[in-house]
Amino acid sequence: MMRPLLGLVACVMFTNRPCASPPAVQPIAQPWQATVNVILDTTRHGSSTRRVATYRLMIAADLFRLDLGSVCVLGRREDASASLIAWHTRDPQSAFIARGPDLAGLLRQQLPPLWSSPLAQFLSQHEDASPLVGHTWSHPPAVLEIDAHNRSLITNHLTVERQFDGESSRLVRETIRSSEPQAEFTLELTYEWSPASSSAAWGIEIANRTLVPSVSALAPRTPTIEVGRSVASLRLIDAIGNVWTVGSAFRPEPTASLPRSADLFVLVLHAVSTREGSTLPLVPLDRLVACIDQLRQEHALESALHAQPRQRALVRIAAVFDVPDYAPARLEEIAKIAERVAADPLLPGLEASVPRMLITHPPRETIDLIAPGASTVVVVVDATTRLVAAIPIEAGTDSWQHALSRVLNPTSLDHKLPESD
């Protein structure tokens, strides 16, 4: 959520008086992005607190994007107007939009105070801009050039120390110290820069979304199908267009002398195309399959070691696409990965009867019913066709790995994602 991230600020007020003519910012030749790590130390009434957060900043020639937890904010400036669009990554049906003559003014109106010199410089087009985004200095700061890579801006109650990379000249660290009696704080921000994806993919189409009154009103959408509800109505077809139902995964194993069937059906719903507004890297599908297979192997070994029956699981991949985004080459790639999914040796006949890859569409009527906004979600279903777990797969976090462990191998809670070859 956005609140903890935007809460890493201290309210030092600046007026809108213009500052002296500082050096102008050089034009942006290509989009860049930074992972921004924030440490805020505050002292009030003799007690100290520390808060830590991370957010992502992307900057191009005429727009920026902030990823504040699960809330994304896109600001665009034009010749005589500006717009601010925000949305929640777990709600593909809502959005917020504001328009005005000035992008800095929109930020002041719509977002809590935020400190970031690169974003402040983008808005003001001046290198010595106040790091409080959208605000100007009450008095021009004194500029101290320590050396080629270190520069300080100093006012009566605020000191801004900036450290630049020797090769790229990009800001890599800034320390902001306030000595205001009612708001004494030290804020340290470090920037990890890398080239960004095309800025054309940073935004969303708001025409089909419901507009909310404020950025703070954005929140995750409650899934239509929650844990415990039936997924029997989920629409699936095979590669040649035959309808396939979830209940078919639990038919009796035809080769067994005694009644035997699957205990779980594990379905990986994977969007063929990047979801709208998504700029984060995805966990590669083949690595996800390797993770699932490894968990199942560990469960089989541990069950045998303790002489306990193991759960039988049928695992399949379903490619999810919008008709305009139909991509035969990508489907063929997914089909090859699907062929590598390990079969359950206790269910040979059932494994042979179920298509290796299933197809469904569109994401808003499949993935979004279970995990709104996700690009990939592992759906775990029991023999009553009820949802046991819905696990969105996201890069940069271990939470989905632990969630898979609890479902596929409850005794292995410290599983790590297998390394790629």
Image: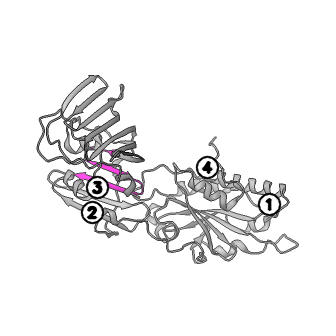
Quadrant of the frame with the C terminus: top right
The answer for how far apart the CA atoms under marks 3 and 1 are is 56 Å
The answer for how far apart the CA atoms under marks 1 and 4 are is 22 Å
Dots 2, 1 in contact, CB < 8 A:
no
Q: Residue at x 51, y 66 (%)?
A: 371
- Kind of residue sitting beneath label 3: Pro
- Kind of residue sitting beneath label 4: Arg
Residue, disc 3: 112
Residue 109 lies, in percent from the top left, at 22, 58
Q: Is residue 31 left or right of residue 79?
A: right
- Kind of residue sitting beneath label 1: Pro
Q: Is residue 244 left or right of residue 29?
A: right
The answer for how far apart the CA atoms under marks 2 and 1 are is 54 Å
The answer for how far apart the CA atoms under marks 3 and 2 are is 16 Å
Residue, disc 2: 97
Marked residue nearer the N-terminal end (2 or 1): 2
Dots 4, 2 in contact, CB < 8 A:
no
Q: Residue at x 64, y 54 (%)?
A: 289
| Viewer-nearest residue: 308 or 244 | 308
Marked residue nearer the N-terminal end (3 or 2): 2
Q: Is residue 304 left or right of residue 313?
A: right
**Main secondary-structure element of the magenta-colored stretch:** strand
- Where is residue 204, by image quadrant? bottom left
Residue 200 lies, in percent from the top left, at 34, 51
Start-end of magenta stretch: 58-77
The answer for how far apart the CA atoms under marks 4 and 3 are is 39 Å
